[in-house]
Image: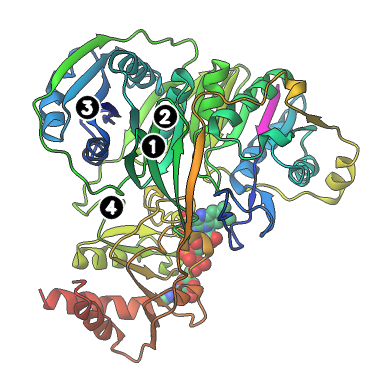
Amino acid sequence: MKIVVLVKQVPDTWGERRLDPFTGRVDRESVDRVIDEISERALEVALSLKDKNKGTEVVVMSMGPSSATDGLRKGLSMGANEAVHVLDDALVGADAGWTSAVLAAALKQTGFDLVLAGNESTDGRGGVIPAMVAQRLGLPCLGSLNIVEIEQNSVRGERGTENGTARVHASLPAVVSVTERTPEARFPNFKGIMTAKRKSLTVLSLAELGMEPTTVGGRSVVLSTVERPARTAGKKIVDEGNAGLELAEFLAARHLI
Amino acid sequence: MSKVLVLIEVSPAGEIRSTAAALLGAASKLGEPVAVVAVAPGSGASLVEQLGSLGAAEVFVGESDLVGKILGAAEVQAVTAAVAATQPIAVLVSNSVEGREVAGRIAVCTGAGLIMDAVDVREDAGRIVGTHSVFGGGFSTESTIDGGLAVVTVRQGAIEERAAAAQPVVTSVPLTVDISSAGVIDSVEDVVVSSGRPDLRGAATVVSGGRGLGSKENFVIVEQLADALGAAVGASRAAVDAGYVSQMYQVGQTGTTVAPQLYVALGISGAIQHLAGMQTAKTIVAINKDEDAPIFDIADFGIVGDVFKIVPQLVDALNASK
Ligand SMILES: Cc1cc2nc3c(=O)[nH]c(=O)nc-3n(C[C@H](O)[C@H](O)[C@H](O)COP(=O)(O)OP(=O)(O)OC[C@H]3O[C@@H](n4cnc5c(N)ncnc54)[C@H](O)[C@@H]3O)c2cc1C
């Protein structure tokens, strides 16, 4: 079975994340970039299948700037067999429509039985890419799975929504997105890091995908970006036995009760 | 007036979900609201009156036996058919797990552009403009589509506008859904919120508990304070992961974003990913026994102390003053 895992590089949520005030895009220079935690969990789902089932081939794929190589290398050192990097200057600032079209083309070229991705990224939080990729490929999409069970010809699992859970399944090939409730990702070990250096990392340009740098449907445009003033600390007290009462007074004074 | 489609979320039991009112309200800011529902044949009629009272000028009913049995395909089909029939300027969809997927697929099918996670919408010279709150409210941006249909996902609980009631015109069409490429639903567990507490999204007051509560049993004090304040209950990811409450209560980076008048954080350290979901609250109160907990950096009123001592005292005081 060939599994392609879509990984996204994002600004580390542990740092201060910023938007470029002129373009409204994520400022990728000001903070550390990491593989999104949820993409790493998607990779973990694929790698744990590979642990059990040696015939499993895992490809990590990312569309992003040249720095996305670091994330792909990490994926290889965690245990993926190969990596695909879709890299093209014309992709800077690509919106969801364009991104999903390019990923769909790259997936077709790479070939797969199953595509795994995170259900949403921690920077954009759009949560639409896996479903859009599936729609473009004419494949079923099982979105937001908390539990993923991969079988020979099908995939099933538990989907989590705001209103509860559902058991769902689809036949392969299919696109699946996972939530942060799937198991935490492994760390690369020394052997993994050493062997990663010999693994293949293919770079694909739009021309190599046979795509023109045009738009697919209406393009999203950012009109304005405003930064909110930072919050500051207010009153802080140490409980000496009646802090609960003081808090009740504070709330009453602010008309919050 | 230009038409604006709203995809109405319907529960497995066939009831209109609470997101409908705000979606129709948002649509009324842009044009004439047209509600689109995908339902089993024959069950659309019973929803029409309620959709009219929420402001739908038209109701477009797509009927298929497959509704509720496959993931999203019937909803995508219903909206695509309604787009062809009504030529709207925008399609509004809830920014929910299900809504987002359907929105993305509609955009692919209709060649529309996406405006994602809007906290407000407006029309500007024929263009649809969405406002977004990015990185937990640290930034506010506006975006639009450079031509063509806009599919907008609207953040739950963000829009206060409500549309005036209407007597809707109803159109029913049978849907032809392609099941060859559909995800199949085997069973659903719809968690009915029976607490009588307000919904986390859009609540005026939120009381959240973290790992500091220590156990599911202890988490009850979070609920007691929430009830004394008429508040919704929230939680940190650590509390969810530890099984104190269901994931639907998670506030933060990967959970719900809330912007209440009052946010009370109990036994929550204030990790940056938690702050991302609540830092735009009007007033923030934190109780934590660690005086260096980062939550105090953004709290308007911070108490260094034990939640198990302070919260019961506060609950008693609140209940006594009622
Ligand atoms: C990509 C990513 C996404 C994430 N998304 C989210 C998210 O959406 N939401 C979220 O919340 N987290 C999220 N996290 C996790 C986040 O980093 C923290 O791990 C989490 O918020 C910690 O939860 P906590 O504050 O309850 O637990 P802890 O950090 O363990 O804090 C518990 C606090 O309770 C206090 N305490 C203990 N006992 C008492 C007592 N008796 N009285 C008073 N105080 C007490 C302690 O002093 C401590 O400060 C995410 C992390 C990552 C990497």
Q: Earlier in the sequence, mark 3 or mark 1?
A: 3
Q: How many marks?
A: 4
Mark 2 neighbour density, 10 Å: few (under 14) some (14–19) many (20 or more): many
Which residue is labeled 3 in the image? B1
Marks 3 & 1, CB-CB < 8 Å contact: no
Q: Earlier in the sequence, mark 2 or mark 3?
A: 3
Same subunit, tags 3 and 1: yes
Q: Chain of mark 1?
A: B
Could you say where residue A57 lies in the image, as x and y percent from the top left?
75, 27
| Res B99 quadrant in image | top left
Colour style of the rendered protein structure: rainbow
Which residue is labeled 4 in the image? B202
Ligand 1 contact, mark 1 (Cβ < 8 Å): no
Q: Is residue B121 visible?
A: yes
Marks 4 & 3, CB-CB < 8 Å contact: no
Q: Residue at x 61, y 40 (%)?
A: A93
Q: Earlier in the sequence, mark 4 or mark 3?
A: 3
**Amino acid on which the number 4 mark rests in the picture:** Gly
Same subunit, tags 4 and 1: yes
Could you say where residue A68 lies in the image, as x and y percent from the top left?
73, 43
Instruction: Kindly report which numbered mark, 4 or 3, lies closer to the viewer in this rendering.
Output: 3
- As for residue A6 lying within the magenta part, the answer is yes
**Amino acid on which the number 1 mark rests in the picture:** Thr
Instruction: Kindly report which numbered mark, 4 or 1, lies closer to the viewer in this rendering.
Output: 1
Instruction: Kindly report which numbered mark, 2 or 3, lies closer to the viewer in this rendering.
Output: 3
The residue stretch that appears in magenta: A1-7
Q: Quadrant of the C terminus of chain A?
A: bottom left
Taking depth in this image into account, of A29 and A46 the one nearest to the observer is: A29
**Disc 2 to disc 1, C-alpha distance:** 7 Å
**Disc 3 to disc 1, C-alpha distance:** 22 Å
Which residue is labeled 2 in the image? B103
